[in-house]
Amino acid sequence: MFGPQHAAVYEVTYHSRGKSWQAEATDVADRILDVRPGATRLLDVGCGTGAHLESFAGRFAHVEGVEFAPAMLDVARRRLPGVPLHAGDMRDFRLGITFDAVTCLFTAINFLRTVTEMRAAVATMARHLAPGGVLVVEPWWFPERFIDGHLGGDLVREPDRVVTRISRSTRQGRLTRMEERWLVGDAHGIREFTQVGLLAMFTRDEYLDAFAAAGCEGSYVTGWLTGRGLFVATRSGEPSSN
């Protein structure tokens, strides 16, 4: 998942349905600065194409990113040539420095399959926070809010390209199986590709327990821009041993 074909149409497709990485980053930055005024250093984990980081760079003096998918990281590096961007797995990356804030947005954490993996990622992100630092995580749908069999569709018309996407999401135990079929037409022809993603559906308490185990005091914010809510946590001490 998240290969070169997907990376090439990723942002334009979501932008067409109203997603604004700039508005989301502005909102998250405001929340961080409310909790930690004067914050200057931010790390975005699962930074994708760098769209959030581009806006964060206007609010924080120093920003960095971590991304697992090479195709997405390539786009981010072209967009942000002066920003340190690291290839890494959110479960166990080690940068050797700490930040005032760490973010993990657009449900990136839910591409981990189990609660154990999610807890490992939260602990890793918390270890990169300075004491009193802020961790912000955007979740996928909670199990009770997921609509089994949900269909999505997008049509994007540009002067030199047309992009269509159809998706169907089904429940497989604690996982969402999202199948996406894309058609991309331009002067070179029409290309079709399919990708299947699996997103874990963690409960609200599982997230909050993970924050607590990582030494962070967290809360869940409803009514955020994407409709899925947002977790905001502050590192209050050292992680527990479990």
Image (spheres, rainbow, N blue to C red):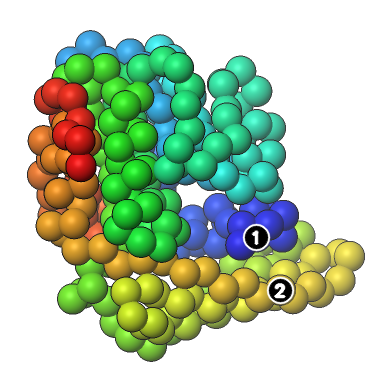
Identify the residue at image location x=26%, y=63%: 202
- Farthest-out residue, bottom: 149
Dot 2 corresponds to which residue? 193
In the picture provided, is 6 more to the left or to the right than 102?
right
In the picture provided, is 182 more to the left or to the right than 153?
right
**Residue 157 rendering spot, x and y as whole percentages:** 63, 66
Q: Which amino acid does the dot numbered 2 rest on?
A: Phe
Q: Which amino acid does the dot numbered 1 rest on?
A: His
Of the 4 image quadrants, the one containing the C terminus is: top left
Identify the residue at image location x=72%, y=54%: 4
Front in this rendered view, residue 124 or 14: 124
Q: Secondary structure at mark 2?
A: strand
**Residue 57 rendering spot, x and y as whole percentages:** 44, 23
The reply to whether discs 2 and 1 touch (Cβ–Cβ < 8 Å) is yes
Of the 4 image quadrants, the one containing the N terminus is: bottom right
Q: Is residue 103 above or below residue 167?
A: above
Front in this rendered view, residue 156 or 83: 83
The answer to which of marks 2 and 1 sits earlier in the sequence is: 1
Front in this rendered view, residue 73 or 22: 73
**Residue 167 rendering spot, x and y as whole percentages:** 51, 78
Identify the residue at image location x=38%, y=88%: 149
Dot 1 corresponds to which residue? 6
Identify the residue at image location x=17%, y=20%: 132
